[in-house]
Image: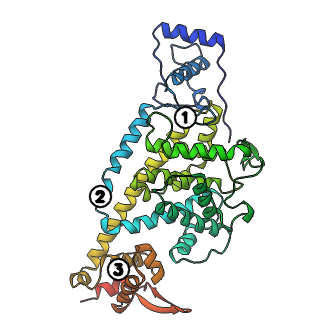
């Protein structure tokens, strides 16, 4: 992973730029295609007619950005430019926040969607940090509340409980002690106990490119971490700066700042992404309970990593990272809506197929979803504990659902060890069709 840093602006170049401005060349923070490009990409473009070479064009764009940048209250000169594209993306996210999910009528299933997002976010965020367990195995572990069997499973298990912790404490003020508590949940059993919930005590932690073993980032001195964490919390809680920062941008900046500081010996990435959710949910963006941002970051890990490098190589211009994160957020919201549509279609198919059962009240909508899954995956095993978690219902309700399906001969009742299980029969469709 490599980023070519921008060239420095000389006095001679500055004089040329001022002359072009006097000649009426309009300041612009984006290229001719409205893209907010880093020098690493812009240097490959064709030079626009009004400029002598691509370096000059870059310096002109950089000068334009400096006129519009908003400074942030951190030790480094963190700043960002509120571009038209960023404002457009924020407006679209805000618009979807104001009722798109209600329009899809998910009230009866919203708890199940939250459970699904908790599980997927826990798995994806842990896999970003190297967890090797498959999604299927991890999902089964979390759904059935099984004890983690290895390091990777512990990472996912911890992340699941960290995100639940955030949901429970999302109205609290963010403090350094709460960040340490979150880190404890994230890393318990996955690193040396003496480092769990503790700030790093040396400068040996670096961000390294795994493919080349090149050091990409040297975090700040460990002795600065307590004061830096306090500044971060003040910003997250909205007490600085003295101008309005959109809550989503605020959450993205917190994400970057904590990752930049790398305050822990391990678990920085998982803690950082979990903290993003904390800030966003604290600002009443309830939709984010349902999205799985890390899944889309994982699909574009190189771009995710480069967005950090672009910021650091270009005088801490956070616009690159903000654009990158807004793209992931937009993708995750679209993914959620696709998922909701798919599940509603499956539910309707199950309801149609089970019409005879539903007409006399023998099967409810939760049971219909189990049957729909069982039709797709013959031989699947369902447990009371797993059904309880996936549907966010009581143990007794979950037991009644599965025992009821067994009594209707739609699931096979069996015992594994001391626990009762319910198995999807291979001839389930014929059993449904045969019902009078």
- Name the mark on residue 102: 2
Percent position of residue 348, x then y: 29, 70
Q: In this orientation, does residue 383 appear?
A: no
Give the number of the mark in front: 1 or 3: 1
Relative to 268, residue 385 above or below: below
Percent position of residue 12, x then y: 64, 10
Determine whether, in the image, residue 129 is placed left or right of residue 83.
right
Percent position of residue 41, x then y: 59, 31
Residue that appears at 51% across and 66% down: 119
Query: Which residue bears the numbered disc 3?
Result: 367
Residue that appears at 61% across and 33% down: 316
Q: In this orientation, does residue 74 appear?
A: yes
- Name the mark on residue 72: 1
Neighbours of disc 1 within 10 Å: few (<14), some (14-19), many (20+) = some
Foreground residue among 314 and 71: 71
Is disc 1 in contact with disc 2, using a CB cutoff of under 8 Å? Answer: no
Percent position of residue 427, x then y: 39, 86
Residue that appears at 57% across and 32% down: 317
Name which of mark 2 and mark 3 comes first in the sequence. 2
Tag 2 secondary structure: helix
Tag 3 secondary structure: helix
């Amino acid at each position: 992973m490599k980023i070519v840093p921008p060239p420095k602006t000389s006095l001679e170049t500055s004089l040329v730029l001022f002359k072009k401005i006097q000649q009426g060349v309009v300041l612009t923070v984006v290229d001719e295609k409205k893209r907010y490009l880093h020098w690493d990409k812009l240097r490959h473009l064709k030079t626009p007619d009004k400029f002598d070479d691509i370096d000059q064009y870059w310096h002109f764009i950089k000068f334009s950005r400096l006129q519009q940048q908003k400074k942030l209250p951190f030790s480094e000169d963190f700043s960002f430019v509120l571009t038209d594209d960023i404002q457009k993306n924020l407006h679209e996210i805000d618009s979807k926040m104001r009722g798109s999910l209600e329009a899809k009528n998910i009230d009866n299933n919203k708890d199940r969607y939250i459970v699904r997002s908790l599980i997927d976010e826990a798995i994806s965020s842990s896999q970003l940090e190297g967890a090797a367990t498959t999604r299927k195995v991890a999902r089964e572990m979390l759904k059935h509340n099984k004890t983690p069997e290895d390091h990777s499973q512990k990472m996912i298990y911890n992340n699941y409980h960290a995100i639940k912790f955030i949901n429970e404490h999302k109205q609290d003020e963010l403090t350094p002690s709460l960040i340490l508590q979150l880190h404890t949940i994230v890393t318990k059993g996955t690193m040396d106990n003496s480092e769990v919930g503790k700030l790093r005590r040396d400068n040996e932690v670096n961000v390294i490119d795994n493919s080349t073993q090149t050091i990409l980032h040297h975090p700040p001195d460990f002795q600065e971490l307590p004061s830096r964490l306090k500044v971060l919390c003040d910003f997250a809680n909205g007490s600085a700066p003295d101008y309005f920062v959109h809550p989503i941008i605020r959450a993205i900046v917190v994400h970057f700042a904590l990752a930049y500081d790398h305050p822990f010996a391990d678990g920085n990435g998982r803690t950082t992404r979990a903290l993003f959710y904390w800030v966003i949910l604290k600002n009443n963006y309830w939709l984010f309970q349902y999205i799985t941002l890390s899944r889309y970051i994982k699909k574009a890990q190189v771009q995710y990593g480069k967005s950090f490098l672009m910021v650091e190589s270009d005088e801490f211009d956070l616009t690159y990272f903000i654009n990158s994160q807004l793209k992931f957020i937009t993708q995750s919201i679209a993914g959620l809506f696709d998922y909701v549509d798919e599940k509603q279609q499956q539910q309707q198919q199950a309801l149609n197929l089970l019409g005879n059962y539903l007409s006399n009240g023998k099967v409810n909508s939760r049971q219909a979803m189990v049957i729909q899954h069982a039709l797709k995956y013959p031989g699947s095993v369902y447990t009371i504990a797993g059904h309880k978690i996936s549907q966010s219902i009581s143990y007794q309700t979950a037991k009644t659902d599965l025992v009821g399906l067994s009594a209707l001969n739609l699931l096979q009742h069996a015992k594994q060890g001391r626990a009762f299980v319910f198995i999807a029969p291979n001839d389930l469709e014929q059993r449904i069709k045969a019902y009078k």
